[in-house]
Image (spheres, rainbow, N blue to C red):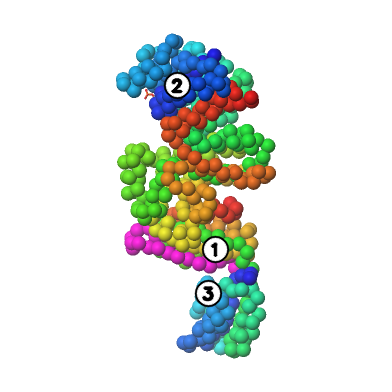
Amino acid sequence: MIKIAIVGFGTVGQGFAELLIRKRKEIEKAVGKFKITAIADSKSSISGEFSPSDALKMKRETGRLRDDVSATEIVRNAEYDVLIEASVTKIGGGDGVEYIRQALKRGKHVITSNKGPIVADFDGLMKLAEKNGVKLMYEATVGGAMPVIKLARKYLALCEIESVKGIFNGTCNYILSRMEEEKLPYEQVLKEAQELGYAEADPTYDVEGIDAAMKLVIIANTIGVRARYEDVEVTGITQITPEAFQVAAEKGYTIRLIAEVSKEKLRVSPRLVPKYHPLSIRGTMNAAMFKTDTAGNIFVVGRGAGKEETASAILSDFYEIYAGSR
Amino acid sequence: MSEVLITLIVELEDRPGQLLKVLQPISALGGNIVGIIHQRGKKTPLNRLPVEISFKIDGSKVENLIKELKSLGIVIRSFNEVRLTATTSVLLIGHLIHTDISDTISSIDSDGEAECVEMHVSMPEISGPSTAIITISASGEEKLKEALEKLREVCRRKEIMIIEPVNEELI
Ligand SMILES: NC(=O)c1ccc[n+]([C@@H]2O[C@H](COP(=O)([O-])OP(=O)(O)OC[C@H]3O[C@@H](n4cnc5c(N)ncnc54)[C@H](OP(=O)(O)O)[C@@H]3O)[C@@H](O)[C@H]2O)c1
């Protein structure tokens, strides 16, 4: 029986719990029996014997869970084999770092969707996992549903990955493709994106390239380029004019926010992308292109965020831990 | 067809119509003028005016062109041919005019091995930022890289946003 604890019970945490309920049969066929033994949010929790469906209902209706036991106590004391860490992203790492450390020290596997801790202490956390003979998985931190981390670590394991170029922020990609299609100024499209729920009320984290840069740091470390957030040269999209798309189009280009890592460079910046290039995708999609020595260029594209998409990335890590070598 | 960049300095008599005499044969042979600089301060003792003309042209036509110019009695002071093998476009956004766009662009060409061969500026409002796409050609990937590095430097200083392409593996 695989025992699962979930810390952070917002969009992603709930999405994962729902997926476990909905796909129980398929999942059990692949990995064996499992059970959710604990759930925590920022101020409450539930553990022991409980029905995950009831916990979801209570959270939706009251905004909290049954008990006052804190997330920290759950991580330290509850009974589980794998911790799903889906609490809120903080740039310096936040509480997530401690949750992950504590779980790893207890010899528990960790699957996280939270970029903060992975960016803040990639090496430290990976070493800690190794030392304790457990896995730390983080597919959901980058590119939502599209496979990026396991693609690099597993399927391209013996390739030299010379560079990765990608679109890792759906908000920016949406704004840029709308500016292009409608010839509208940035501010107007941003407002539209906010109304549609594609951009936050404070869009800084997305439009200034911070989110994409954090994801780039994670990819960099994954392919063996040691990097910290400060190493990334970051330019956002706020200065882009509608005319920019027109003059670029005359030369057959569009403009996208591209995150790029190679041995020489880590940068997030708007770039000219030829219209025929696979990275010239539209809307909220994400995409990544791996340039390798032996496998040539590998390209993936998919939805970069969303409840189910992120939950599916967590589920793929879960599968990897328990059935990946089968 | 392999394109070359020619930088030609001719000495012209300082009266109307002289420049045209040089430009006509160039365009007749399919040449594409990139820049013309009158070196007004450098008049020769015979009161001739040196003019630097740069243009792109099919390399196989250069010999004929020079012959033609000579037969028209044009004094060629110097002649420099650079094979353009590397080309890229970059987009600039910012106060391009206030910050002297011709100075910005000439920054890339310090040794004649790289040149802005095409430019399109869009300036929607006088006070607002303008946008330009420029195409840079150089005698090789290395020279193109150098030119881009110089351009980045100038743009940083002038607070101009530079948007580079993703396709060319220059960076
Ligand atoms: N949404 C996506 O599409 C997506 C995609 C990829 C990655 N992610 C990442 O996944 C994580 C969760 O995202 P989300 O969209 O689910 O966010 P969310 O809806 O805001 O939920 C965040 C959850 O974390 C809990 N939390 C906040 N601070 C906490 C703390 N100190 N200790 C324990 N729990 C805490 C919150 O508790 P309360 O419920 O009590 O407020 C909430 O349950 C984030 O790191 C995010 O960057 C999200």
Q: Which mark is residue B33?
A: 3
Marks 2 and 1, how far apart in space?
58 Å
* Chain ID, mark 3: B
Q: On the image, which quarter does residue B78 sit in? A: bottom right
Residue A93 sits above or below residue B155 on the image: above
Q: Position of residue A139 (x, y in %)?
A: 53, 32
Amino acid marked by disc 1: Ile
Image marks 2 and 3: residues in contact by CB distance under 8 Å = no
Determine the secondary structure under disc 2. Answer: helix
**Badge 2 density bin: few <14, some 14–19, many ≥20, Cα 10 Å:** some
In the picture of the structure, the residue carrying the numbered disc 1 is B136
Q: Is mark 1 within 8 Å of ligand 1?
A: no
In the picture of the structure, the residue carrying the numbered disc 2 is A21
In front: mark 2 or mark 1? 2
Q: Which residue is depicted at the point 57% across and 64% down?
A: B137
Q: Position of residue A9 (x, y in %)?
A: 41, 23
Amino acid marked by disc 2: Ile
In front: mark 2 or mark 3? 2
Residue A279 magenta:
no
Image marks 2 and 1: residues in contact by CB distance under 8 Å = no
Determine the secondary structure under disc 1. Answer: strand
Viewer-side residue, B48 vs B63: B63
Look at the image and give the residue range highlighted in magenta. B109-132
Q: Which residue is depicted at the point 56% across and 25% down?
A: A319
